[in-house]
Amino acid sequence: MHPDLMKVLVTAAGALVVTVIVILIALPRGNGEVIVVDQTYSATAEGFAGEMTVTIGVADGEIVSVSVDHSDTPDYAKPAIDELTDQLIARQEADLDVVSGATGTSRGFIEAARQAVEKFRE
């Protein structure tokens, strides 16, 4: 392979890697808008069926995304986590309302979110 062609391929591959990284850290909002998260903060608490980790994404000093890793029953946990995520983003704090029918999941989410928000506010 010609050395100049090799340089072009290596440069193109590097640009592709950077593009993929930028795409991976960009998180969509509910309205389809894509934002880049400046920082993430995670914390873990006990959910209904084990540990639950809540990670908040922050951009321009505001909580803009939430992801949750858990082992709670999906049929009960997903609607509760969706509701709690909406509350957390809207209120910008972890003073959240427990979701009826998913108390264990709610309590775990709220505690982990509280700890993650504390890390963010430090």
Image: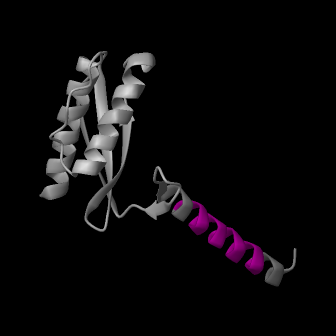
Indicate the quadrant containing the C terminus: top left, top right, bottom left or bottom right: bottom left
Tell me, yes or no, if residue 70 can be seen here: no
Q: Is residue 21 left or right of residue 121?
A: right
Indicate the quadrant where residue 83 lies.
Answer: top left
> Where residue 72 sits in the image (x, y, percent)?
36, 19
Question: Which is nearer the eye, 69 or 63?
Answer: 63
Residue at point 26%, 19% (across, down): 100
Q: Is residue 73 magenta?
A: no
Q: Is residue 16 magenta?
A: yes
Q: Is residue 62 above or below residue 90?
A: below
Residue at point 44%, 17% (across, down): 75
Indicate the quadrant containing the N terminus: top left, top right, bottom left or bottom right: bottom right
Question: Magenta residues, as a range?
Answer: 7-21
Residue at point 49%, 59% (across, down): 26
Q: Is residue 93 left or right of residue 5?
A: left
The residue furthest right is 1
Question: Which is nearer the eye, 9 or 31?
Answer: 31
Indicate the quadrant where residue 18 lies.
Answer: bottom right
Q: Is residue 31 left or right of residue 68?
A: right
Tell me, yes or no, if residue 29 can be seen here: yes
> Where residue 25 sits in the image (x, y, percent)?
47, 58
> Where residue 14 sits in the image (x, y, percent)?
63, 70
